[in-house]
Image (tube, rainbow, N blue to C red):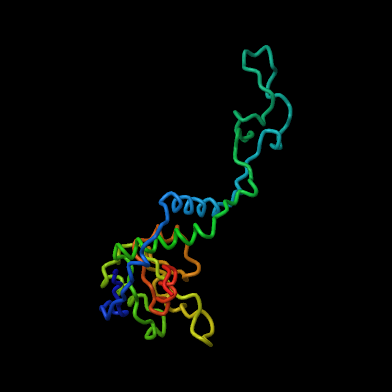
Amino acid sequence: MATLKKYDLAGKEVGSVQVEETLLDTSAHPQSIKDYIVALRKNARQWSASTKRRNEINRTGRKPHPQKGQGRSRQGDLAAPQYKGGGIVFGPKPKFDMHVRINKKERRSAIRALIAEKVKADCVHVLHSKADLKEPKTKKFATFFDKIGVADRRILVLGESKGASGEMGNPHENLVKSFRNIPKKEFARLPQINGYELARCQHLVVLESALDEFLSILGAS
């Protein structure tokens, strides 16, 4: 059974959360996880790079110099690739329908495996409460990350998908503003996380309000 340490905003340990071993058993194959992350990176590309070939260059079609009589190599026109401002040989052109389909079952399995790996490595921490954060305070979070020993690590802070009942606006606004200027610290709602972000970060900080939703990804009822 794995244990997640729970901290308050001052970095003091105030409790722990037990995670059953059955939730950490995953059958995701490493190759399927790699394929999923590679597909995510490919789908993030715009495929909008475009270069002009020699027939698209707006230059004169006149020969640069006579073909014979000067001892120079024959040349056709100034739009040839060897001239400055000429066409590009085998340059990129916009591609369409380059989307790589990601199987939903494989995606869920990969995310679960990556989270389970973080839990087993003791790289998941629970933030007890953000109720006392009435306004953005970068210093508080800088102290918090330093106290739990992850100040120099890449951290992904995970929040719940929705705010409390009747809460207006973004419930995580003050929280996000508090550490957005701290390097290598990012925030994401649980439904929005993907395998690339999980593989890229070194530690996870889960808000207590999002803990049940976090454990449900691992299969908890």
150 vs 136: above or below: above
Tally of numbered discs: 0
Q: Quadrant of residue 51?
A: top right
Quadrant housing residue 4? bottom left
Q: Is residue 216 left or right of residue 47?
A: left
Residue nearest the viewer, comparing 143 with 84: 143
Q: Examine the rendered structure and indicate whether residue 210 appears above or below residue 194.
A: below
Report the residue at 65% width, 14% height from top: 70
Counting from the top left corner in percent of width and height, residue 172 is at: 46, 78
At horizontal 33% and vertical 68% (from top left) the residue drawn is 124
Tell me if residue 101 comes above or below residue 108 in the rendering: above
Which residue sits at x=69%, y=23%? 76
Residue 10 is situated, as x and y percent measured from the top left of the image, at 29, 79
Outermost residue, front direction? 22
Front-most of 41 and 91?
A: 41
Looking at the image, the residue that sits furthest to the right is 61
